[in-house]
Image (spheres, rainbow, N blue to C red):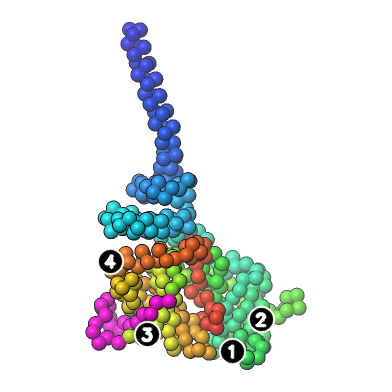
Amino acid sequence: MDISLALVLAAVGLLLFILLVFFALHKEEIQFYAEGSAKGFRRQEIKTLWKTAEKCGINTPSLLYDSVPLLNKCIAMIQSETRRNGTADRQDVKQLVASLLAFRRHTALRTAEVRRLKDSRALERGQRLNIIYKGKGIFSSRIVDSGRQLTISLPVQQRKLFQGPPLELPAAEWVGKRVSVYASRSGDACYVFDSVVEGAGSVGGKRCLYLQHSSRLDRVQKRNSIRCGCKISAQMYVIKGRFIDYTIRDGETGTACILEDLGEGGAMIRTGGKGRRGVHVKIAFSLNSIPIVMAGIIRAVEYNRSIRQSRLHFECTYIEEGMQDTLVRYIYENASERERMQAAEQDRGEQSGGGGFEPVNTEE
């Protein structure tokens, strides 16, 4: 009896020793899986991220659960390494990259939703604004205070170069008018809302307008993907029919344009003339001699009157899988570290302005 008990105790002790050794050797991996499960991630997602951490030499793998910049870095490293060693077209590599891209989009959207503004009262003092006064144009302003009303500095309109100081309308001309307000927040996106000018006055000796607050804010920028700066010649085709033909037919005429940045979710297009929001288009161009066609919609427009050119914010809604693989590889191989970081830390507002380009509030 004593011998049997001793054998059982020895077996239990050996088992405990084996478990202790196993936990000691795999402590970090076990903690990683436990943290992932606690955060609601699926086992396959956790497995993919752990494999990525090992492949990329990440010292603190748990950062991958929340860090879009780190995910960007890992994707770029895998893309570069597999292209260099000739394994980029292997099915397991393509599946890993596809899983990481899907996880990155999910993480970016979750992060954006957390910091999303729900009410204009959350806008801070000093926030720059673009005010669109229908029939008068686009004006610049800043938030002076946010209390019962949104107090802004008297809006001014920049004149064309060499044509005098900024234009100011009399404060009384604003009162009672409905305006559209654009607020591009650093580290977030561009928010748009409509308001009514309820009054005019002064704060600290400076003329101001009092706007009605809004609880309906539209978040204009939803890219959440890396954009690679570029200068690629392309052709743009307006889609007029009810059904979209994703091919470019012989004899089909397009408009010459330039892609100024490019991402898996869209592009910035520069073209002649004044563009319009809401237009469905196809964009055709080549990457490393491979033809690419992206179909989508123009979400926002900026126009430069002096040179009569537009910058079109294009959102891609369809691209063939093979073309998408080529596009993603090009973006991650050519995007700078700054651009990878910028995709996570600061969306470029759809109404960015600058360089003589101003937002256009027109639709198809």
Q: Which residue is mark 2?
A: 154
Which quadrant holds residue 108?
A: bottom left
Q: Amino acid at mark 2?
A: Leu
Residue 327: image quadrant is bottom left
Residue 263, compared with residue 235, is above or below; it is: above
Of tags 1 and 4, which is closer to the observer?
4
Residue at the (48%, 57%) spot, across then down: 69
Given contact means CB atoms under 8 Å apart, are the residues at marks 1 and 2 in contact?
no
- Image coordinates of residue 71 in percent, x first then y, are 43, 55
Mark whose residue sits in front, 3 or 1: 3
Cα separation between marks 3 and 1? 27 Å
Alpha-carbon distance for marks 1 and 4?
45 Å
**Can you tell which of label 1 and label 2 is closer to the viewer?**
1
> Which of the two residues, 168 or 100, is positioned nearer the viewer here?
100
Q: Which residue is mark 1?
A: 160
Residue that badge 3 annotates: 256
| Picture residue at 49% right of the left edge, 84% below the top | 303
- Mark 2, residues whose alpha carbon is within 10 Å: few (<14), some, or many (≥20)? many
Bounds of the magenta segment: 231-253
> What residue did someone put label 4 on?
322
- In this view, the residue farthest toward the bottom is 163
State which tag comes first along the sequence, 1 or 2: 2
Give the mark nearer the N terminus: 2 vs 3. 2
Q: Residue 174, position in %: x, y?
A: 62, 85
